[in-house]
Amino acid sequence: MKLLIKNGIIMDGTGTPGVKADLAVSGTRIEAIGAIDPVGFDHVIDAEGKVVCPGFIDTHSHSDLQILLDPLVLPKIHQGITTEILGQDGIAMAPLPLDYIDAWRKNLAGLNGETDEIDWTYETTAGYLDLMEERGHAPNVGYLVPHGNVRMEAMGLGNKTATSRDIKAMKKVLNREMDAGALGLSTGLIYIPCAYADTRELIALCKVVAKRDGVFVIHQRSEADGIILSMEEVIRIGRESGVKIHFSHMKMCGKKNWDKLPVIFKMLDAAAKEGISISFDQYPYVAGSTMLGAILPPWAHDGGTDRLLERLTTPDLREAIIEDIKSEDGDWDNFISFAGLAGIFITSTRTDKNKCFIGKNLVEIGTLTGKDPYEAVLDLLVEEKNAVGMVDFYGTEEHVMEFIRRPEQNVCTDGLLGGKPHPRAYGAFPRVISEYVKKRPVLSMETAVHKMTGKPAKVFNLEDRGILKKGNLADILVFDPETICDRGTYEEPDQFPDGIVLVMVNGSIILENGKPTGRLPGRILRMNQQA
């Protein structure tokens, strides 16, 4: 099909000012940009007064399971996202050895959800991506090898330091998974089993990634009290392995840590001068979201979910868990310490019985159950077998703006899609424009578009995408700069944004005038195999 978008304001994704021009698409690629005669086109779209730009790239997505159940991924395509990077936080869908399927499904349930509607015996990244291709999907998908999955296959889920033999086994798994086309390696150093890795292990694995020009995407050990030491570790990993570093959902958690922000920025500046490649993504909100089990100390998770549930139902261990949470001296990111019981809200549960707690904070759950809130929350985790999601409030709008201005920053959703999710899952990208371009003088429109398109495409080695130019693949978004805005709130998050006129993936329209077309033209974007 030949398609023409006429009279739009072309913002090409490089950050240069927009220009009024036409854009022609032939098949899957951009054929021309300029003044174009409309004769001979199958479909002509008048974009007068609208911005025409590359499709948005979500560099931190948790659609890993949902995309198999809902290949349209409606919360994403409705906000103009044409590419998602899956496999985040070191704990994702593949690789998944057959012996660990049950344990790993339980471990992921609070993050990605749970279902019996798919065949979980795909075993490897290649098998998982093949399953996705068989089912089809609307957006493009890139995948990161999750460190936790690699460690699980090589070492199990226990809390132990990797030996040289273990590291050799992990490198073998990592090489196999990257051969399947993964764009890099991810880790989440607050999640098990990633949390049990030392710096030596991470450097060794990142050397494998660096040789392939991949990216190391890291939820660092601390985004709160220990953030300085945590960032020193990450920068050391980049220095000694040569890998490109990409911090996940960069933030500063907890009022007592807010004065550390200038130190963090100095560290980023120094690393750049040293020649270490560093970037980060950010969602434009003052609250985060993850599995509720993250409020527990890492030792409680040792061995997986079944062992966790045993500890939560063993009186002396349960008491020790609560004492660790209440302590201010731990060397782990204590969500209750920096967000407070009243600042953490339930977003999803596994069973209908406890859906009444969705939208309630941990204090309210204690009141509703007539229990101490700590006891009530641990009871909830036991009843739900750890499959509970949460939202946690940790920061300030001033810090959101400070991070969004940084040259290393690009935008992401980090959106969990189950239950009553964080509003970022539905509106992160439009919110950047409505809140930080239009309402507050933080970014120009061209810079905002660059941070959502061309910049992330470069960081993740996405070939022929992220920039509008002749010959590139036609991942294209048309939006109304006057009306674009997010509509979701923390109370009612699942609302699609306004102002998204048209979304195109690989030359095929997947959303037009607010309505999905049902087409599934997305591709798996494998390293060096994307054309």
Image (cartoon, rainbow, N blue to C red):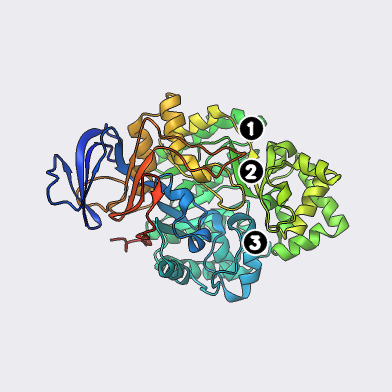
Q: Amino acid at mark 1?
A: Asn
Report if the CB atoms under discs 3 and 2 are less than 8 Å apart.
no
Q: Picture coordinates of residue 124 (x, y %)?
A: 49, 71
Q: Nearer the viewer, mark 2 or mark 1?
A: 2
Give coordinates of residue 192: x percent, y percent: 64, 58
From the image, tell me which residue sits under label 1. 257
User: Is the N terminus in the top left, top right, bottom left or bottom right quadrant?
Assistant: bottom left
> Is 338 left or right of 130, judged from the image as shown?
right
In the rendered structure, the answer to whether residue 218 lies left or right of residue 215 reads right
On the question of residue 239 being in view, the answer is: no
Closest to the observer: 482 or 402? 482
Of the numbered discs 2 and 1, the one sitting upstream in the chain is: 1
Q: Nearer the viewer, mark 3 or mark 2?
A: 2
Check residue 107 in the rendering and tell me which mark sits there, or answer none: 3
Amino acid type at image mark 3: Asn
Helix, strand or loop at mark 3: helix
Please, is residue 270 above or below residue 166 in the view? above
Q: What residue do we see at 46% from left, 33% from top?
A: 404
Task: Tell me the SS state at disc 2.
Answer: strand
Q: Which residue is mark 2?
A: 391
In the depicted view, which residue is nearer to us: 304 or 445? 445
Q: Would you call the spot at circle 2 few (<14 residues within 10 Å), some (14-19), or many (20 or more)?
A: many
User: In the image, what residue occupies the spot 86% across and 44% down?
Assistant: 370
Query: Which residue is painted at 39% across and 60% down in the image?
Result: 211
Q: Secondary structure at mark 1?
A: helix
Residue 184: percent from the left, percent from the top?
44, 57
| Label 1 crowd (10 A; few <14 / some 14-19 / many >=20) | some
Q: Give the mark, 1 or 3, whose residue is nearer the N terminus.
A: 3
Q: Is residue 35 left or right of residue 291?
A: left
The amino acid sitting under disc 2 is Val
